[in-house]
């Protein structure tokens, strides 16, 4: 009986130790990585780095600024960075990289719709679109005398043998003016022909050797200063003493005119001691130069409140207000002035012709 109790006790001890050992094994931490699944059963991926795609700006047309013409025109865009290309069409279709590549200008001789895109790193901008209407003057038939060309010389007095030398000189001057104003092949029907004739006849500006005036070409700062000084009836200095850091870029023919403009306070260059005469001139720059040359009144006139007034430089605003108030230059139909728009030869002669007839030289 006693042996049975001893054996039973030993069995109970063995069973107890087995249970304790099992609990310890279960509580030991494991080295396995437990991945918690989302409660909704959806596995969320980590977001990848965002790729920023740089879309180039639309091309901007700076010349011509109007859309109705009676002669051929050349459409030009604002210069872009070297890594940007402009592609265009003239039939109204949407341009692609397979369309014509813009280089220096788009020549139009008939009504056309120009569409263009800017492309950088194979990324295209939104297209820009502008329609240009070119209406040719109606030619008369052989039997239609109502549209026959007018002979401008018929009303000129013909000098007689006994006419005084003064009368003969006056007649010759009038004939010479007619020859000068009609000598260009690309100004007939142009909106600025009257102003072009005025400055050409006044020997303020000239055309080119190929008998063109190129009214829609841009005008540089050097060319603008030259015609301003000429419109003031002043001669260029024979020996200029210019000290700009970019003197080497100044054309020889421009140095004398530039010296006069500096002496008269018309221009003084930029803060970095450059003059940048080969750079195309902007509307606000030309307004300032013209008003400094001709307007003798105080800079106190109030101009219209243009929608883009904040884009006009503070140093230019008083001169622009004066120019607008005096009718020398106007804004656009959308109530903007576009101070940074580049100026064409036609626009420049228009401004200078008005200055010569409305204002006095300072």
Image (tube, rainbow, N blue to C red):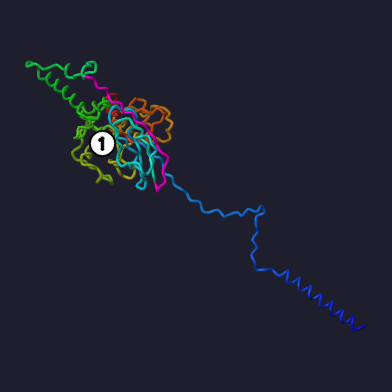
Q: Is residue 178 magenta?
A: no
Q: What element carries label 1?
A: helix
- The relative height of residue 40 versus residue 93 in the rendered view (above or below) is below
- Residue 182 at x, y percent in the picture: 20, 26
- Residue 355 at x, y percent in the picture: 29, 27
What is the quadrant of the N terminus in the image?
bottom right
Q: Which residue is drawn at 65% across and 57% down?
A: 37
Q: In this view, does 157 lie to the left or right of 187?
A: left
- Residue 354 seen in the current view: no
Outermost residue toward the left in this view: 161
Q: In this view, does 163 lie to the left or right of 5?
A: left
Write the start and end of the magenta stretch as one range: 120-141
Residue annotated with mark 1: 223
- Residue 165 seen in the current view: yes
The quadrant in which residue 287 appears is top left
How many marks overall? 1
- Residue 326 at x, y percent in the picture: 34, 25
Q: In this view, does 87 lie to the left or right of 159?
A: right
What is the quadrant of the C terminus in the image?
top left
- Residue 322 at x, y percent in the picture: 36, 28
The quadrant in which residue 268 appears is top left
Q: Residue at x 25, y 38 (%)?
A: 258
Q: In this view, does 26 lie to the left or right of 15?
A: left
Q: Give the camera-side residue of 315 and 109.
A: 109
Q: Give the camera-side residue of 354 and 45.
A: 45
Pointer 1 local density, CA inside 10 Å: few below 14, some 14–19, many at least 20: many
Q: Give the camera-side residue of 158 and 96.
A: 96
Outermost residue toward the bottom in this view: 3
């Amino acid at each position: 009986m006693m042996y049975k109790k001893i054996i039973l006790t030993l069995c109970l001890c063995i069973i107890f130790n087995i249970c304790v050992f099992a609990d310890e094994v279960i509580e030991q931490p494991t080295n396995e990585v437990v991945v918690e699944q989302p409660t909704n059963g959806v596995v969320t991926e980590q977001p990848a780095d965002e790729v920023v795609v740089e879309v180039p700006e639309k091309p901007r047309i700076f010349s011509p600024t109007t859309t109705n013409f009676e002669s051929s025109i050349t459409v030009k865009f604002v210069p872009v960075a070297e890594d940007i290309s402009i592609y265009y069409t003239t039939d109204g279709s949407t341009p692609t990289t397979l369309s014509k590549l813009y280089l220096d200008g788009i020549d139009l001789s008939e009504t056309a719709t120009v569409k263009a895109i800017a492309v950088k790193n194979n990324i295209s901008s939104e297209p820009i679109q502008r329609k240009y209407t070119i209406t040719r003057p109606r030619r008369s038939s052989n039997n239609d005398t109502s549209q026959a060309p007018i002979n401008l010389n018929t009303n000129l007095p013909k000098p007689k043998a006994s006419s005084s030398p003064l009368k003969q000189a006056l007649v010759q001057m009038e004939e010479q003016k007619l020859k000068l104003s009609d000598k260009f092949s690309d100004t007939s029907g142009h909106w600025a022909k009257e102003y072009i004739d005025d400055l050409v006849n006044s020997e303020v500006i000239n055309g080119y050797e190929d008998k063109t005036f190129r009214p829609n070409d841009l005008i540089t700062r050097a060319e603008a200063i030259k015609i301003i000084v000429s419109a003031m009836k002043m001669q260029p200095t024979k020996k200029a003493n210019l000290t700009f850091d970019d003197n080497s870029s100044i054309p020889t023919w421009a140095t004398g005119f530039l010296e006069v403009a500096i002496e008269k306070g018309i221009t003084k260059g930029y803060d970095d001691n450059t003059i940048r005469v080969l750079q195309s001139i902007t509307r606000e720059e030309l307004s300032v130069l013209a008003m400094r040359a001709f307007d003798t009144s105080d800079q106190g006139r109030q101009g219209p409140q243009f929608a883009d007034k904040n884009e006009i430089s503070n140093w230019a605003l008083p001169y622009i207000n004066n120019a607008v108030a005096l009718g020398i230059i106007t804004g656009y139909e959308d109530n903007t002035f576009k101070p940074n728009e580049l100026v064409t030869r036609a626009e420049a002669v228009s401004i200078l012709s008005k200055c010569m007839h409305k204002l006095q030289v300072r």
